[in-house]
């Protein structure tokens, strides 16, 4: 989810002008670069309908599941680019989502049996929290979050039977039982906190740790999972990542590909924290929000929150023989 997470039309004129100037200044430096190649747009979405993809999960057959933020939907894009809406979430009587105002579908995770888990924020206690969609079923909330929460990045640990959820407004990470139940604050570390708007945002489980991006500080964080399941001390792993949204790991190492939302870039971050740009607006990115990887394909959805131009789903080839690590 971007910082701040709203289309420019939801701001006052001065704020919209500031973002416009920032976007003009963010001229793409390079086009596609290793380890990515052959970028292409798989699907274009209708901005007017709020079809702005926020988070991603990839199906075994190459289909892509997406939360469609302001449409309050979960959808699936087939390999040939056709969108099918899987679920539409109930609208709140009056949305008051922290930092955003509008109701928004955000984080997404997939279980091996095809069950989808996703976050929904409305600023109301009756709808905000983590939801579940079983194949062929209807969406149901399995964990209620406080109304002042903004659940965002979401990851599933099936072995432990837990979901991990980042809260961008309160700057913390919660756990939720897969079967449903009350959430537990897992980490409330100061490094997860927002400075002006969005704190903890993108979240992934990798190599015995929870990895979290703090959008406000542009910092990639690693939080070890202790033997007892308790959060260890938070470790900064990369800094200077302005607009850091979500990310994905292409392999067993700590290298990853991250979406930088306002600048419309995707960057490769090496294990030592160094990075280089691998995709830009020249390749089709328009405020990218997350990254999904399946085999040798990298998927990057763009929500056009600030550009207000061409929300889409981009795919690129992952050249595993040309890894820069």
Image (cartoon, grey):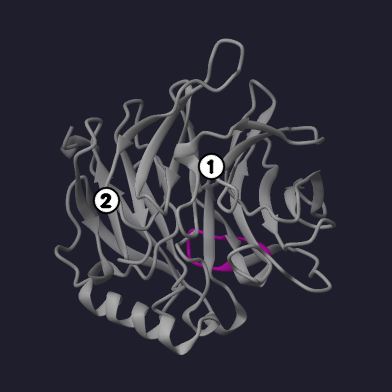
Q: Nearer the viewer, residue 165 or 265?
A: 165
- The residue singled out by tag 2 in the image is 267
How would you rate the neighbour count of disc 1 (Cα within 10 Å): few for under 14, some for 14-19, many for 20 or more? few
The residue positioned 64% from the left and 21% from the top of the image is 159
Residue 76 magenta-drawn? yes
Q: Position of residue 209 (x, y in %)?
A: 47, 25
| Part of the protein shown in magenta | 73-83
The residue positioned 43% from the left and 22% from the top of the image is 207
Q: Is residue 168 left or right of residue 196?
A: right
Q: Nearer the viewer, residue 16 or 300?
A: 16
Q: Residue furthest bottom?
A: 13
> What kind of element bears circle 1?
loop
The residue positioned 51% from the left and 33% from the top of the image is 189
Residue 110 seen from this side: yes
**Mark in front: 2 vs 1:** 2
Q: Position of residue 188 (x, y in %)?
A: 57, 35
Instruction: Please tell me which of labels 2 and 1 falls first in the chain.
Output: 1
The Cα atoms of the two marked residues, 2 and 1, are separated by 25 Å
How would you rate the neighbour count of disc 2 (Cα within 10 Å): few for under 14, some for 14-19, many for 20 or more? many
Residue 6 magenta-drawn? no
Question: How many labels sit on residues?
Answer: 2
Q: Is residue 9 left or right of residue 322?
A: right
Q: 119 above or below 177?
A: below
> What kind of element bears circle 2?
strand
Q: Is residue 146 left or right of residue 202?
A: right
Label number found at residue 60: 1
Q: Position of residue 38 (x, y in %)?
A: 24, 58
Q: Position of residue 119 (x, y in %)?
A: 66, 51
The reply to whether the C-beta atoms of the residues labelled 2 and 1 are less than 8 Å apart is: no
Label number found at residue 22: none
Quadrant of the image containing the C terminus: top left
Q: Residue furthest top?
A: 227
């Amino acid at each position: 989810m971007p910082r701040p997470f709203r289309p420019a039309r939801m701001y006052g004129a001065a704020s919209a002008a500031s973002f416009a100037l920032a976007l003009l200044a963010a001229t793409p430096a390079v086009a596609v670069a290793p380890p990515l190649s052959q970028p292409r747009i798989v699907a274009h979405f209708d901005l007017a309908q709020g079809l702005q993809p926020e988070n991603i999960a990839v199906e075994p057959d190459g289909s892509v599941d997406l939360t469609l933020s302001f449409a309050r939907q979960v959808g699936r894009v087939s390999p040939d680019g056709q969108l099918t809406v899987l679920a539409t979430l109930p609208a709140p009587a009056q949305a008051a989502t922290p930092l955003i105002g509008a109701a928004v579908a955000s984080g997404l995770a997939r279980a091996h049996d095809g069950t989808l888990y996703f976050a929904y924020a409305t600023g109301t206690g009756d709808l905000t929290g983590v939801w579940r969609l079983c194949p062929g079923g209807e969406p149901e909330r399995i964990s209620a979050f406080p109304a002042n929460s903004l659940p965002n990045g979401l990851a599933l640990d099936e072995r432990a039977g837990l979901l991990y959820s980042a809260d961008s407004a309160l700057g913390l990470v919660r756990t939720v039982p897969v079967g449903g139940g009350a959430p537990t604050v897992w980490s409330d570390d100061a490094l997860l906190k927002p400075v002006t708007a969005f704190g903890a945002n993108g979240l992934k489980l990798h190599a015995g740790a929870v990895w979290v991006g703090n959008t406000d500080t542009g910092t990639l964080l690693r939080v070890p999972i202790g033997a007892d399941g308790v959060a260890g001390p938070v470790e900064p792993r990369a800094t200077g990542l302005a607009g850091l949204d979500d990310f994905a790991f292409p392999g067993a190492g700590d290298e990853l590909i991250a979406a930088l939302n306002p600048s419309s870039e995707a960057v490769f971050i090496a294990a030592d924290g160094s990075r280089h740009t691998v995709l830009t607006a020249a390749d089709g990115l328009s405020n990218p929000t997350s990254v999904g990887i399946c085999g040798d394909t990298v998927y990057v959805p763009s929500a056009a929150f600030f550009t207000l131009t061409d929300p889409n789903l981009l795919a690129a080839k992952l050249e595993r023989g040309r890894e820069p690590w």
